[in-house]
Amino acid sequence: MDFSSFLLMRQEIILLAIILLLLVAEIFIPKNKKSSIVHLAIFLFGVHTVIGFLSIDECSIFGGSFQTNNLIHFFKNVLNIGVFILLLQSADWLQEKIVTQDKGTEFFILLFSSLLGMYFMISSGDFLMFYIGLELSTLPVAALAAYETSKRISSESGIKLILSAGLASGVSLFGISLLYATSGSIFFHDIIGVISASNLTILGFILFFTGLSFKISLVPFHFWTADVYEGAPISVASYLSVISKGAAVFILMILMFTIFKPLMHVWENIVYVIALATMFIGNLFALRQKNMKRFLAFSSIAQAGFILLGLISGTQLGSATIVYFILVYIFSNLAAFGVVQAISLKTGKENMDDYDGLYRTNPNLSLVMMLALFSLAGIPPVAGFFGKFFLFTAAASEGYYLLVFLAVVNVTISLYYYLSVIRAMFIRKSDNPIPFFKNKLYMRLGLLITVLGILVIGMYSPLYDYIYELSSIFN
Amino acid sequence: MDITYTILIPLIPLAVFLLLGIFNKSIKPAVSGYIGVAGLSTSAALSFYTAYQYFFVHGKVDGVYKAIVEKTVWMNFTETLHIDIGVLIDPISIMMLIVVSIVSLMVHIYSRGYMKGDEGYTRFFSYLSLFSFSMYGLVLATNLFQIYIFWELVGVSSFLLIGYYYTKPSAVSAAKKAFIVTRFADLGFLVGILIIGYYTGTFDFETLNNPEGSAILNWASTSFMGLSVITWALLLMFIGGAGKSAMFPLHIWLPDAMEGPTPVSALIHAATMVVAGVYLVARLFPMFYFVEDGFALEVVAYVGAFSSLFAAIIAITQTDIKRVLAFSTMSQIGYMMLALGVSKYEGHDGLGYMASMFHLFTHAMFKALLFLGAGSVIHAVHSNYLKDMGGLRKYMPITNITFLIAALAIAGFPLTSGFFSKDEILVAAFENNKLLYFSGVLVAGLTAFYMFRLYFGIFWGKDTQYKHAPHESPISMTFPLMVLALISLFGGFIPFSKYVSADRVGFDVHLNYPLAAVAVSVGLIGIALAWIFYKKENDLASRFANSLGVFYKWTYDKFYLDEIYIFVTKNIIFNRIAAPIAWFDKKVVDATMEGIGNQTAVVSEKIKGMQSGKVQDYAFSFVAGIVILAIVFIYLWTN
């Protein structure tokens, strides 16, 4: 292994450099100009995002612990875009915190560390690297959830997250050790050859699977979601629901399509049951939420159920549809969270009733929200429709007609609550509506990118073809 | 030949539409008129440039005008079946580009005078641009799906423009009628497209139309109720075409569409959109001709012939001058359909095809001229009815002369443009089907008669006493009249058959003197009769009408077709079919859905308690979930 191999980890190294730089930067920036840390962080991460688009060779380094290929690389870029949008949307809020509560760079450092963990997780070539990545991606988020130390609910959410995450990761680790016991290796490429459907292996798989299910918040491992989202700062909830979930789904997909492929006759049933439970429970709970953050929490649980439809097919088509869906979902959900963030920041209002008559006072924000919800609900021609449509195609092409039918029923249920938000904004009247306000540049930019994403991804079909091609590794 | 720039031809009007549409309020009316005219002039110039490049520089390869296609895949279904977006340049699409450009540009210029002072001036121009965009797109379409998209877009623009005076209930209902009737016909078009896509695996015109291609060669492979499915598809698509082109019995929207501003009638309901059906059949002509020995084409011929006769008879009795012109349009489009229907494919046998396109061209010019002339008259006397007019030649000399030229052209007076195109249609009909020929000759006579009834009624006849003396329209309105009059006069000398033919090779035509003589004399008889009846005020016409008795009344009431439609929809469809279905929908479907909705709410309420807020409960369900999964999938559900 020569020095140039390190360049294959370019993404990780640059991100690490940014983290270190920000850590040091705080010392040099004078106290009265501390809020410019936000500009610096956004700039550095923007550069990182752009550099990320340079292609990277396929490789497997450190004795196979770390691997990457075009699909993984593409997905890291997707995560980067998501985090970048998130940063834009959080910029104003962070500046305010830095000025009023004397915060520093810790938000960025924690966030980027978590992202770094995700990089390692999805690039892992053995279970050790995977586990370290998983932990690195989870632990900083617990601290982030408790970021607003002055608020009791924020601390509560941090504690709940760390407790649940600890349990999940313990279970996961137990599963990994059982898999090691039966296969004699922690390297993925070794395990592929020897895995068989013995009882112990299946138990190991189930334990491992539930650990990741926790991150994706699949039912019945989802209970933490709503409480944490509600208590945590919106940026963190947004991060959990979009980036963290996306990365976990992605690595789960890779592992299930490769090393656990011989167990497919077992896991397809598990996924089937969990998909149904997740869609139904998520939707039924979402129906009665009054708080926008809780509402989006349950909506994101239901969305995770839909993603499993792509997983169950176990094919190249399934992989392509999942990655495409996550891409669409990142834009849609970030748009929704972005609007909630903007309104919460200006007025502190987070309940659905507060949105009554929003269109009359803030037409632009309402339109963004409407697009986001249309996309989440899957209404053509916005991107979300194609995302869901492709997922359903993937499941149907493997003959899961009943599952697809029940998923469509769930889409109908979800339509109700998505539209009820739109009804509140556009049709309902309010005596005390949210007054008109103008967003700052970063927030506007953050929302604009999501809107473009929602509109363009749906109509620009070569993108899907490209992802499909990348997914050919699962053939 | 690089034709990428032709994409600009539709895109410029689209840009103008967006500009005028979005900044509706902040653009001054006068400016918006200029923007509209400038945009369309650019498109028109590009169209002419394309035509020049194609016909005289690049188009002909080995003696054949090859189609030039530039496209990109938009949506992929299978290897062969995909929806493309692009431009297709071939003789007929270029001819249509020219027609649309000339008429649309003239109408734009004319509208600056005609619509002056109107409240929605900018809105009007934005709609005109939207229409021009859609029509250009339709003409340039490379495949069935693309043409369908623009087909619907022209429908929408037509709807918007007919209903332009949206405070007038009659205009609103006319707009709705036009939209619903054509939409209904378009259903046939869509089903036809899907059948074609399913059985031939492609939407692409060039692939479908290839006489050696599988779509044409394999037409017999699947049949349905005694006909090839491809024939069914063609017939269904023709229903769509008949709806847009106002063929019997789907023509009922066209007379009502005259509620729109007159320039709109000239542009959409005389020259461009209504010939879309003809264009569609011409576009798919090889399929119509080769599949099942041209069965579908024969249907086209008979529908066209019947519509042209039917409409010509009705036109004689109408008193609203725009409605006369509307029925005349229907009649002339029937002519074009007839010509296509009797055409064959190769060389001189393809005369009908060429004649149809030729007549489409000349008709677009003189009919637009007639409508614009009528608009000029209406502008002067503020009425649509013949009874309010008469003797206008003294007040409006330019309108008078240009209108006369157009009337002569449509009547087929020798050496005018209509004479040549009509003559060729009749020759084609004579060579292939005598019955259709005689019907065509009869229509020629009727056309001359009703057109000169109109002309004499407006410009001669009684000396009406006007409250305000009518005066000639401004130059912005008379200029387009003069341009169109010139083309109507001399357009016939274009050697059309060299450029436009079914097999794209081109051939020579010569006047068939005996047949031309017959057509001309029939036309002259028509004109003479009109002269006797209407030149001077007299009661000959009404005496004659009375002697016809009930037949006259039927004709005047357009053979009660509207009433039949209303009877069928109200009594049969609404009461017998729709009402029971509505009951079922309300009491069964809705009730079921509401039940599900209520149950969902109940379940949702019941499980609320699961989310307790306590981490230990969450951990418990986490572990319980694992245990259940483990037990179920290790011991119970193994396969």
Image: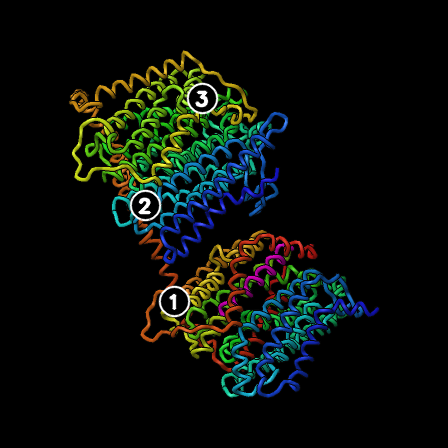
Give the residue type at disc 2: Met
> In which quadrant will I find the C terminus of chain A?
bottom right
Residue A311 visible, this angle = no
Report the magenta residues as a range.
A316-337
- How far is disc 1 from disc 3 in space, using C-alphas? 60 Å
| Chain letter of disc 2 in the image | B
Q: Please rate how many residues cluster around mark 1, counting C-alpha atoms within 10 Å: few if below 14, some from 14 to 19, many from 20.
A: many
Residue A315 counted in the magenta span? no
What residue does disc 2 label? B115
Q: Which callout, 1 or 2, points to the residue nearer the camera?
A: 2
- Asked if marks 2 and 3 touch (Cβ < 8 Å), the reply is no
- Nearer the observer, B148 or B517: B517
Left or right: B459 as drawn, with respect to A189: left
Left or right: B2 as drawn, with respect to A124: left
> In which quadrant will I find the N terminus of chain A?
bottom right
| Chain letter of disc 3 in the image | B
What secondary structure is found at the residue carrying circle 3? loop
**Coordinates of residue A375 in the picture (x, y in percent):** 49, 61
Please tell me the numbered disc located at residue A359: 1
- For the stretch drawn in magenta, the main secondary structure is helix
What secondary structure is found at the residue carrying circle 2? loop
- Colour setting: rainbow
